[in-house]
Image: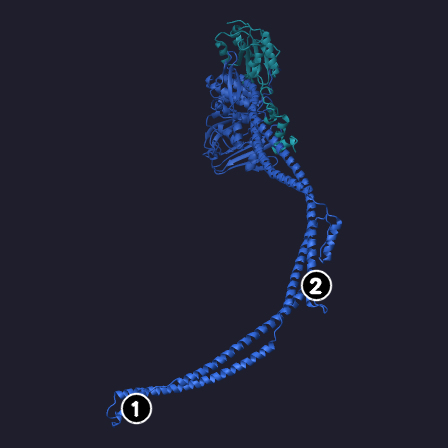
Amino acid sequence: MKLSGFRGFSQQHEFDLDADAVVVVGANGHGKTSLFDGILWALSGRIPRLHKEDARFVSLYSETGQMRVELRFKEYETGEQFTVTRSFDGKEPRVSLDTKERSYEGPSAEGRLIDLVWPDAASASDSGEALASVLTRSVYLQQDLIRQFIEAASVQERFTAVSELVGVGRVTALQANLEHAKKAWSTVTNQRQDELRPLRERQTTIEARLSELVARSSQASSAITPEVWDQWWQSQSALGLKVTRVDPASRDAPAAIDNAIKQLEALRQSSERRLQAAGTLKNEIAGLATHPIPDTPLLREQVTTLRKQLEELRRVATEEQARLADLRRQQAELQETTEQLKALAVLALKHLGDHCPVCDQTYDKEATKRRLETMANAGISNAHRASESDKLTDMLAAAAAKEKEVGIAESTLRSGEQKVMEGQITEERISQRLSEIGVRPNADDSREVTVEKVVAEAESSIQRAAELQRTGESLALRLAQSSAAAMIDELRREAEILRRENIDREKTISARNRTGELAQRVIEALRIAGSVVVEERLREISPLLQNIWARIDPHPAFRVIKFFTQVFRGKGELSTVLSDPVAEKDCEVPASVLSSSQLNALAVSVFLALNIGIPRPPLSVAILDDPLQSLDDINLLGLVDLFRQTKKRRQLFVSTHDGRFGELLARKLRPTDIDGRTIVIELEGWNRQGPIVTTREVKCDPVPLRLVS
Amino acid sequence: MTDSSADFTPTDLIAAAAQVLTDGGYHEIPRRFQGWDTPSSRLFENEYNIVGVVVFGTCGELLQTWPDLQGSLVDVISRHIGREESKAWDGYLVLLSPGVAPSSGTAIDNIRYDTTRVRKLVATGDDLRNPTDVERVVRPLLPLSQERGALSHESALDLLPRLLEAQDIPMETTQVLVDAFREQLPLLERLHQMRGEQ
């Protein structure tokens, strides 16, 4: 082992630990515990009794601020070696593992290390912690915790700790795996159950549909004969339809019939349109015959004559109107002159004097006055003008009457022209419709006769198409009924397949449920089995514990010891029971009857019993850190004799603070042949660089047997 | 002091001690040594220890003569082994008597707790109910037997088929699960296959 910067070893120290027994001697504080802690830390990466933070293990006097432990192991049986190196640079822990085959770093190194030393820990949630737990229970008896197992730990904690030691961790892992697998199994089984539900519904639906079809199939009509089938298709061909005849058993038969019926329907509609068109034609032709075309040239001539007469009348009237207008103008001028003279006469009468106001001459006043009065009372006669006006009125009335006559003639002309035009349009339409229905009247037949033939043909076609349609629909129905029979067969097959599949699925689900139930029973049994394994294992170890306890024999009465286990409320409990076989007394609390020294002896006994009793411990090593404190001489001798026997079964590391006892250990643990090796490591004079380390090898006895020889 | 009332004789005890020690790898020394020459004493040796076994008819005889016998044993050892040799520290004196110890037993305990010269292993009729109890007395001198108290090499998983059978789980079922677990195979699938369901 190489240590540097680790706890009490500030500088690098290398230790030769390749021996059957290693005795470490050093005063308290000289690094004995640090040396053994180095082994624990290198393997598990932790020292549970101290702190969890690696930084706390770095020596305060480390020149680099880092710590490093390198441990080289040799497989006892195969001789193969591996080296684990763990370090901490102040921030990050590192671990590496070198085997003959390859090197590992980090988590892979941790994993491989677990594989090599304690595969059972691989199933633990924290394999390093599990390994540390096993190491401190069965490999490394720590000075500070020497009696913790029998004193402080509860019966349940003891049971749990021992469970790990005896390999129940694997049973627990199996149980956990099985529980997980069972859960997943149940989930899948439930999914299968869910999947089955719609399949059952589908089966029910198909069977219901099948029942319905079977009930209907009893009403099925007769099958289609080939003759009827062929005749129907030939009839359509005869009608000029482009149909494809198929076999009635063909899957395409319904579609073919459907297609043919559609064509028949189209033909019938076409014929009906033709019939309708022919009927219209017929009416229009008849209409032409009942409505003769008027003589429009004659009418037009009459209109021309009337219009001329009207123009003449209008001219005469216009001239008369002009003359009358001139007359009215002359009368107006005369009237104006008359009015002016009348006004002058009135004015003159008003101002009539003896002399003329103009020439101041005398005049005949009376004559003038009469004359003026005559003038003042003068008027114009309108009788002539009225007669002239009546004459004009008559002339205008004659013109209006003529104009009305012209209007009537023109209206008659327009009506005639309209009729002519309509007649022409009707003719064109008739020609067009005849053309549309493909009729070209021959010379022998009139249009009426031709149209009559078209009507007859259309009616015949409609009737024929309707008959074929009815026949076709009948055929289609019989085909559908045949198809229904086929569908019944198909549904029967499908229902049968589905029924079998569902039965298989139900069987599968049922089988899965049975497997799940069995797994659940195994899980329950495993819960109990874990405790039973511990009980059984401890029962196996108990004689060894008794064997070891008897070698130390620290108590004159309580000479029998055994493990007592029980499962209480599902939790295992472990006690160490002392018995006085003579007085037949038992004690489950050793601390109540043993002295401190005797308790130490008991703790060492339990530790060694677990260490030796486990067939495959993480290390074939027993490490005891200063276990001899407070022991009286007789117990100490007994313990040393026990160590000597232990050395034959385990590589033994023992430390002591007592130099004299160190010497005793060295002598007692001496090798007995040249293949054996015992090393004494003395840690002296600790300073800031660490302890002064002296290593010496204990020589073997060259002639072990003296008296025998 | 009480005389022996046990059903066995000193000869039974010496024979039992000889048997246990030779079974434990000791060699019986047939030679007679000066001062160590009584019919009820024997001398044994292995690579570590020299063990003198003496059987007394009564506890009184034991209490009276054990110091002389210890001296004789130390003489024998010192004549054959150098003072500085490690083996010189490995003398053991086994003192046996079928007689019952005095009522207090203090005298016997004093011998046991007297660690000067050689370690003494003492037993009287209180502890020796029959000759086989001698094995317990000399047990500190015997190797830790391989077969006694060690766990079987079966892993806990190997024990499961038998343990679960007691709970009506067929052994085959458990074995299949254990094998699948070890081989990291799907547990339930293997169980299902075993049941012939697939």
Residue drawn at x 34%, y 86% is A379
Task: Inspect the image, locate mark 2, and give the three-letter code of the amino acid beneath it.
Answer: Lys
Q: Which subunit holds the residue at mark 2?
A: A
In which quarter of the view is residue A644 placed? top right
Residue A534 lies, in percent from the top left, at: 55, 24
Residue B39 lies, in percent from the top left, at: 59, 7
Left or right, A461 with respect to B79, comes to right
- Mark 2 element type: helix
- What hue does chain A carry in this figure? blue
Left or right, B55 with respect to A492, comes to left
Report the front residue among B76 and B10.
Answer: B10
Q: What residue is pinned by disc 2?
A: A453
Name, please, the residue furthest toward the right.
A227
Report the front residue among A617 and B28.
Answer: A617
Residue A215 lies, in percent from the top left, at: 66, 40
Task: Quarter of the image for the N terminus of chain A: give it.
Answer: top right
Residue drawn at x 63%, y 28% is B173
Q: Earlier in the sequence, mark 1 or mark 2?
A: 1
Task: Quarter of the image for the C terminus of chain A: give it.
Answer: top right
Q: Is residue A297 above or below residue A106?
A: below
Q: Which chain is cyan?
A: B
Q: What residue is pinned by disc 1?
A: A371
In which quarter of the view is residue A647 placed? top right
